[in-house]
Amino acid sequence: MNDAEISLAATLEPISDIAASVNISEDALIPYGHHMAKVDTQKLPTSGKRGKLVLVTAVSPTPAGEGKSTVSVGIADALNLVGSKTMVALREPSLGPVFGMKGGAT
């Protein structure tokens, strides 16, 4: 299957369910439809426990197109697989074509 076929075959979960899986209440969500939302950080629960941050930067994609987005999603999937509550944010995922490199959002 190509990327478009995979995308069309996917079943999207409601954003409220995804937020609940990482202890974000619906009250903290500013929804844009059923599958996207911004998060009001002022309404996030506070606890003494601090999270960890993995920053993936400055990766030139391989000839197959594996770059920052692919690596970031892979790290998040691996951490979720071992039981960590993990979120991934892809910032500016489609700048590859601007710089004449393969890319275009994984």
Image: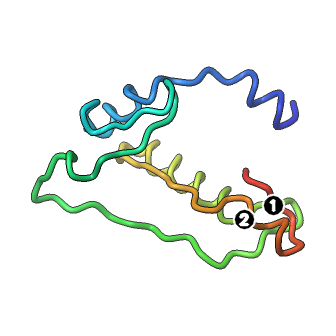
Please give the name of the residue rendered at 49% of the width and 24% of the height, measured from the top-left corner.
Answer: 34
Q: Amino acid at mark 1?
A: Gly
Percent of width and height locating residue 59: 69, 75
Are the two marked residues, 2 and 1, in contact with CB atoms closer than 8 angstroms?
yes
Under tag 1, what secondary structure? loop
Q: Residues within 10 Å of mark 2 (few under 14, many from 20)?
A: many
- Disc 1 designates what residue? 103
Please give the name of the residue rendered at 86% of the width and 70% of the height, measured from the top-left corner.
Answer: 101
Q: CA distance from mark 2 to mark 1?
A: 8 Å
Percent of width and height locating residue 8: 76, 24
Between circles 2 and 1, the one closer to the viewer is 1
In the picture shown, does residue 89 fall above or below 54? above
Percent of width and height locating residue 4: 83, 33
Under tag 2, what secondary structure? loop
Q: Amino acid at mark 2?
A: Gly
In the image, taking residue 97 as reference, residue 25 lies left or right, namely left
Disc number at residue 67?
2
In the image, taking residue 106 as reference, residue 90 lies left or right, namely left
